[in-house]
Image (cartoon, helix red, strand yellow):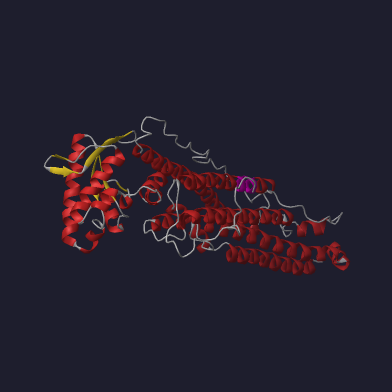
Amino acid sequence: MTGRPFPWSPPQAWHPPMATSSRVEVTPDMVAGAAKNFAVGQRDIVDAWMRLQGALEANHGMAGDDKAAHAFDAKYAPAVQAVWKGFRQAIVVLGGTSLGLTQTANNHLSADHRSRADGRHAPIGLLGPNQVYPDMSMTVSASAIGPAATGPYLGANKVLAKLLAGYWPAAQPNNLESAAGAWRNAASEVIKVADWLDWCMGRLTDSTSARDFAAMQKYWTKVHRPGDGHSLLGGLAKLCDALGDACEGFAGVTWSVQNKVNLIVSAQEVLVILTAGTEEIIARLTAVLDRMAAAGVAAVSRVTGRTITAETVAGLEAATAGTPKIEPVEAQFEATAGKALADEMGATDSGTFANSDLAKAASNGQERGLAYEAYLQQKFTGGDPFSSGGRQFDGVYSSPENGVTWYEAKSGRALEDLTGNPDKFSRFKSNAGQQAAIARKEGVHFEIVSENPIPESVKSWLDKKGIPYRVVP
C-alpha cells in the first residue's frame, strides 16, 4: 500500500468546484500527476497479485485428492484462471493509461510550444514516461489438489484403521482458511486501488460540462465501476472475495466431517465391537460412514456452487475481454479520452480566439471565420490558405510529430450546426473526405481544427474515415 501520493478515498480537503463555474481547469501538470498515480496504482496491483501468488503457493495442495477435493476444484480452478487473466489485464490497462496520459500532456506541451513565438527554437521540455510494466508474465497458480491430510492416530487397531482409511477428509482446513484470508486481502487491495484511482480520474472528469469528457468517463467505467462485477477491477475484487468464501466454506465442511470421524474413534465401545470383528456391525458402520462421506462431498459442492457462481466468473471474463490491452488502449486513449483531455487543456489557456482582438473585430459569421483562420496562422506560425487538387485548405504548418500538416478550420457553431442539417453534414463529409484524400496523395498530414468542442456524431464520422481532429479554442 506504500507509495500512493494520495489516500484511496477523496481527501476531506478536496471538494468539487462551486456552481459558479461549469468546468474544471485541466492542465498538463494535472494530467501528468494522474499519469504518475496510475503507474503507482499498477505497481500496487502487481504487489497484490504477487502476495496472493505466494500465499497460494504456501498452501499448495490444500484441498487434498479425494471426491470432495475434486468437487471443489471443478469450480475453483477455472475461477483462479479467470482471476489470473484479470490481474494481468488490470496491470496492462493501468500501465497503458499512465502512458496515454503522459502522451496527452506532451501533445499539449508540444502544441503550446509551437504556438509561442518566443519559444520556437527552445527545447520543448516534454515529460518522460513513468516506469510501468507493459505486460506481465503470470506464472501458473499453485494447484489446490495435493496429498491427503494425515488422519487421526488409531494405535494398533488395524480393523479400525482399515475401515476409516477411505473416510478421513483429504483436505487441510488450516491451509484452506489461510488461503481464504489471502483471497480476501487481495480483494481488499484491488478495491482500495480502484477507489483511489476513481478519485484520481475524478479530478480530471468531475464537475465539468464539457461534452467530450463523456469519452473519458466511458473509458474508465470499463476499468472500474464501484460495486459492479462487470467492470475489470470490480469483477476482479468480487471473484477474489468469492474464492475466499469458497475456501472458508470448504474448511468448515472439512472440520465438521473430521469431528464426526473423531467421535467414532473416541467411542471405546465401537473399538471393542470392531475388534471382535462382528461383520454386521462393521457393515452398519460402513454404511454410516458412506452416508457421512457423501454428505460431505455434497456440502462441498453446495458451498462452492453458492460462492463461485457462473455469473461472477463470467462477469470478470467479459470485463477482461472487453477492456482494451496496452496497444489499443494507447490508440483509443488518443482518439477519445486523450483527445478530450487535450481539448480541455486547450480551453484553459488564457489566450483563446474568443478573447483575441481578431475575434472582437469580426462583425459577422463570415468575418469571424476568416479571423479564426488568421488566429490559427499566428498560433501555429503557419502559412496562408491555399488550394490544391481543386480544394481549398485554410492553412499549413509543420510539427515534429506529423511533419507538414494541412488543415480545415471551423469556428463558432460550424460543426455544431451540422448535427441538425443533413444536407450540410453531407457537404462537410464530401469536402473533408476529398481534402483528406488530396493530402494523402501529396504525402502530407490533414486534420480538422475546431474552435469549440466537436459533436459526437461528427467525431464518429471522422474516426471512421481516419481523419484526425482537435480543438484549438
Percent coordinates x, y for residue 60 in the rendering: 67, 47
Of the pair 109 and 222, the residue shown nearer to us? 109
Q: Nearer the viewer, residue 82 or 388?
A: 388
Residue 174 visible within the image: yes
In magenta stretch: residue 52: yes
Q: Is 158 on the left-hand or right-hand side of 369?
A: right
Q: Main secondary structure of the magenta part?
A: helix
Identified at 62% across, 56% down, the residue is: 188
Percent position of residue 299, x then y: 65, 66
Question: Is residue 149 within the magenta segment?
Answer: no
Residue 308 versus residue 144 in the image, above or below: below
Whether residue 277 is visible:
no
Tell me which corner region of the image, top left, top right, bottom left or bottom right, holds residue 140.
Answer: top right
Q: Is residue 358 above or below residue 442?
A: below
Residue at left 55%, top 43%? 138
Camera-nearest residue between 320 and 310: 320
Residue at image location 66% in from the left, 58% down from the top: 247
Residue 6 shown left or right of residue 333 in the figure: right
| Residue shown at 45% from the left, 64% from the top | 20
Range shown magenta: 47-53
Total numbered labels: 0
Q: Position of residue 70 (x, y in %)?
A: 61, 56
x and y percentages locating residue 418 in the rendered image: 22, 59
Q: In the orientation shown, which residue stands out farthest toward the left? A: 390
Image check: 51 left or right of 452?
A: right
